[in-house]
Image (tube, grey):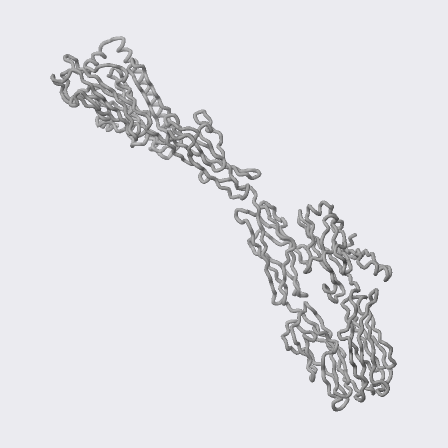
Amino acid sequence: MHFRGSRMTKTIGYRDWRWQALLWHQVFLLWTTVDAQTRYSIPEELKQGSVVGNLAKDLSLGLSEIFERKLRVASEAGKQYFSVDAGKGELLVNDRIDREALCGQSASCVLPLQVVVENPLQLHRFEVEIKDVNDNAPSFVKTEHRIEIAESTVVGVHFLLESAEDPDVGSNTVRTYTLSKDECFTLKIRELENGRKIPELVLNKSLDREKKAVHNLILTALDGGNPVKSGTSKITIIVLDNNDNVPSFEYKLYKISVQENSPNGSFIIKTKATDIDDGPNGEIEYSLGIHTPPSVQALFYIHPVSGDMFLKNNLDHEQQSSYRIDISAKDKGLPKMEGHCSVQVDVLDVNDNAPEIILTSKPSPVPEDSVSGTVVALLSARDLDSGENSKVTLELPKGNPFTLKPSFSNSYELVTSGALDRESVSEYKIEITATDSGSPPLSSKKTISVSITDVNDNPPVFSQSSYNVYLKENGVAGSILYSVSACDLDAGQNAKVSYSMVDSKVHEVSVSSYVYMNSENGSIYSMHSFDYEKVKVFHIQVQAKDQGSPSLSSNATVHVFILDQNDNAPAVIYPSPHAASHLRVPRTAKAGQLVTKVTAVDADSGHNAWISYKVSEATDASLFTVSVYTGEVRTKRAVSEHDDSSQRLLVEVQDDGEPVQSATVTLSILLEDGVSQPVLELRHKVSEPSKTSGTITLYLIVSLASVSVLSLVTLLVLAVKCLRSSGSDASCCMRRTHCDEDKKPNRNLHIQLNSDGPIKYVEVLGGDVMSQSHSFRSCMSPMSEYSDFTLVKPSSTTDFKEVISVLDASLPDSTWTFESQQVSRKYNKCLDQI
């Protein structure tokens, strides 16, 4: 039942004293809700496990929610007096509760409780009122009290007696006093402003020392509990003669306020008493009352002669805010007469206690994608001072994505106030400063660690967007080509990266047929060896994917370039190594006479395809020579009559690779008389109209036309690509020196006719992705007296195959060949014209 702004109390009490004794350990089941705050009421000294109330019911929680939401109790007291029964949701007594130890003589004793539930994180405040139980009997500081009274003391004089102390409060504290019977004395109970009862001994009949010199009395203190408890003190009264005037104070009660930080020895107040007697009977000696507790005697001191009161030790407002001190003034007469007064010392609070920050709920890890306002932790602040000195404010340093949200009764929620990024900051050390309102203000700090948990918000990133791998051909299958790596800024499973290849085609075949990729470390292995003459370059699209949910990925490209190795020997295409024929040379041949021309090609590229010729063996080494670069076989000197008619030459053809590859061809030469010059014979054959001549001419025309068309198309394609790629580079339009390396290589043209045709071999090569694009020029080579049509590349030397096509139209077996740029010196005139 909730009544805002009012108090409703439900109590199961005791009908009489007898019931109360029987139900000593039963809970009062008192609960109160003020401003939606629930209060339970229980007696002190309950047994462990006693039920205080049903938290689950009052919080409207089901029993299953107690486990799921981790219901727990946080006490602001020093000990954990309460616990929660997880099965029933009941609040149980966890430890012995002594009201007097917790609250002393305070009329109200309330223990604040903070009940924390999670998912979502919430804080509820409860109060448990501890009711007093009469578990303490009244007691006196001294069990025996001696009083000296002159027999001449007039009837009606009051003598102050020691009051009993009872730690209980309310009706359970000291209620009354009784005195054993005596004809001369009666008991009077005086009640002070604070409700404290002081027993006083009243002289009811004149004393006669001669009849009775000593009176023995028993003072009994009774409390109001049920059953009643009591304590006694023995009073011995010695009857004396004379000194019939009692010292008298100016005031019965002195009041003074002292700051708690007053130094030792500080003057507090001056008390003064007078005695109208003369001589020693009028001399007064001051002292603290005989029933002054030792704790008070340790704090205060009164000068025996002047009556001035001084501070003897340090005061503490938080320990006790007020003291009531009895002062005694005795004369020196016989018997001694004694007067009394009280001094009330109020201790003023000084801001001497720094505020304290209490962490009610430990911070839970926060996901980095949490929305603003997410509760991270619950905390509260308190200050043992009072008034303005106890008002506390909390502050957070600037720059943190957190803020404090006030809840109630100095309770706060630590919530997020901005975006979180674990990759930037994985843990925050939040320093909270608590400052009170005192003068000067005091402060304290507490550091709270908040961990940021990872969310998969970063894809893996490769170390490079693309990789270039250069691989020699004819490698061993299964060897590693390259290892790619990607890193992920996330953590845990979100940062665990696996690698794969995106399916693509290489010459219409899946790239997985060429290479294999290790999914764990990103290593790429070859499935078989590669042949540069078949595959020069291919591309692998690799993907790095994390294990987050949902997973993120990124791609990179691996360009694999196959490097040529010298694995092909030169192949002689003219003269045919399989055709057995004899070359005829007239004996009238002069030095430098062209005999024939050896032509060879090499399937490799670059330096591996550069071909040179030399004579390996000869019948007469002084008669014939072969050009190193062109393969032309010529006479070194004039043929003489003494030379053998049958000459044999072994010509070796070598490439420029490492190791060197070579091939040989054997030439059989007959020296004959009367043989016409080859040039005249050939010209004669061309001039004679015949069916064979017509066929050769037709082949020549078709071949020349094909080459011309191909050259024209190549130039047009290069010009169009250049114009599209760079409008600002004018020089690119003609020479094409600035072109992308990624462009698709030109198609290679290979033409091989039968051995009986005029054209033996034709090859046209364009540039590939590894070299710069080629530009071609044409000229008529004057290197011999025969008509040659030559395509040359007049650019700088590269590591790849140069293109030179030579068409020897005059020879019976006309051939187009491709040679290195390092042509013979006889080409220089042609190159100069270009």
- Can you give x and y, in whole percent of width and height, for residue 702 in the image? 31, 16
Q: Is residue 128 visible?
A: yes
Q: Is residue 533 above or below residue 757?
A: below
- Can you give x and y, in whole percent of width and height, for residue 163 in the image? 78, 74
Q: Is residue 590 above or below residue 370?
A: above
Given the current orientation, which residue lies at the most extreme left position?
641
Query: Is the C terminus in the top left, top right, bottom left or bottom right quadrant?
Result: top left
Return the residue nearer the eye: 686 or 467: 467
Q: Is residue 431 above or below residue 336?
A: above
Left or right of residue 250, residue 812 in this image? left
Left or right of residue 731, residue 424 in this image? right
Left or right of residue 623, residue 196 in this image? right
- Can you give x and y, in whole percent of width and height, for residue 60 in the image? 74, 48
Please tell me in which quadrant of the rendered image residue 216 appears. Answer: bottom right
The residue located at (68%, 67%) in the rendering is 318
Left or right of residue 322, residue 732 in this image? left
- Can you give x and y, in whole percent of width and height, for residue 6 in the image? 78, 57
Return the residue nearer the eye: 474 or 623: 474
Please tell me in which quadrant of the rendered image residue 677 appears. Answer: top left
Given the current orientation, which residue lies at the most extreme bottom position?
279
Given the current orientation, which residue lies at the most extreme top position?
690
Q: Is residue 592 visible?
A: no
The residue located at (13%, 16%) in the rendering is 588
Return the residue nearer the eye: 713 or 667: 667
